[in-house]
């Protein structure tokens, strides 16, 4: 079984990750250019950047759990594009219907992506088409696989 993680706040803008099993966690803010990792490499840079951004906008102690839920939802049919609205909304690309799905998320999980509760939606030629017309600078986080568009 893997380590459990928590975020500890040491000041207004300083956070560090702590493993429940005592493993040292190295983390620097993603904008510093340093890669975040655990001593065994289990907490990836992408998850580190997600957790850091969520911790800065929401409850820091819940950031790792929320990150793990987002990471689990980011597979197969749905691809995480980024976070908006003070990290209250996750935007996912739906590969089946070629649309963007807005989903709330918290420590209990991500809202139902398969039934977002809307009857009509805008389809795009592809996620690149959507991302090029979106105002990415206003997002809280653009997933690292799409940051080249900034």
Image (cartoon, grey):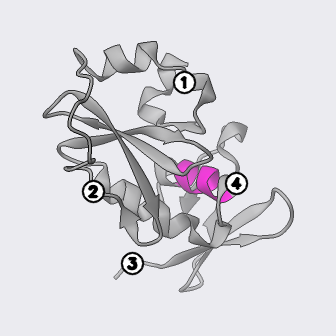
Give the crowd class for mark 2: few <14, some 14-19, many >=20 residues within 10 Å.
some
Kindly identify which residue carries mark 1.
136
Q: Earlier in the sequence, mark 1 or mark 2?
A: 2
Count of number-bearing discs? 4
Q: Upstream in the sequence, badge 4 or badge 3?
A: 3
Label 4 and label 3: CA atoms lie apart by: 25 Å
Left or right: residue 123 compared with residue 29: left
The C terminus is located in which quarter?
top right
Q: Residue at x 54, y 24 (%)?
A: 136
Which numbered disc, 2 or 4, marks the residue that appears first in the sequence?
4
Residue holding disc 4 = 56
User: What is the residue that sits farthest to the right in this orientation?
Assistant: 11
Circle nearer the viewer, 1 or 3: 1
Nearest-to-viewer mark from 2 and 3: 2
Q: Residues within 10 Å of mark 1 (few under 14, many from 20)?
A: some
In the rendering, at what x and y percent does residue 71 appear? 37, 55
The part of the chain drawn in magenta is 48-55
Kind of element beneath mark 1 = helix
Identify the residue shown where x is 46% and y is 37%: 143
Along the polypeptide, which appears first: circle 1 or circle 3? 3
Estimate the x, y position of residue 21 in percent, counting from the top left: 53, 86
Q: Main secondary structure of the magenta part?
A: helix
Query: Which residue is situated farthest in the front direction here?
Result: 119
Foreground mark, 4 or 3? 4
Q: CA distance from mark 2 to mark 4?
A: 25 Å
Mark 3 sits on what residue? 2
Out of 97 and 144, give the one closest to the viewer.
97
């Amino acid at each position: 079984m893997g380590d459990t993680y928590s975020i500890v706040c040491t000041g207004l803008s300083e956070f560090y990750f702590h493993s429940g099993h005592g493993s040292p966690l190295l983390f620097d803010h993603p904008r510093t250019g340093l890669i975040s990792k655990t001593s065994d490499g289990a907490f990836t840079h992408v998850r580190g950047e997600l957790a850091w951004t969520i911790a800065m906008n929401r409850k820091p102690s819940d950031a790792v759990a929320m990150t793990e839920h987002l990471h689990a939802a980011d597979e197969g049919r749905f691809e995480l594009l980024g976070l908006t609205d003070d990290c209250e909304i996750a935007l996912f690309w739906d590969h089946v219907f070629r649309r963007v799905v807005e989903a709330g998320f918290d420590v209990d999980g991500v809202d139902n992506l398969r039934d977002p509760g809307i009857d009509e939606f805008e389809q795009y030629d592809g996620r690149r088409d959507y991302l090029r017309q979106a105002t990415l600078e206003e997002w809280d986080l653009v997933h690292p696989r799409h940051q080249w568009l900034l």
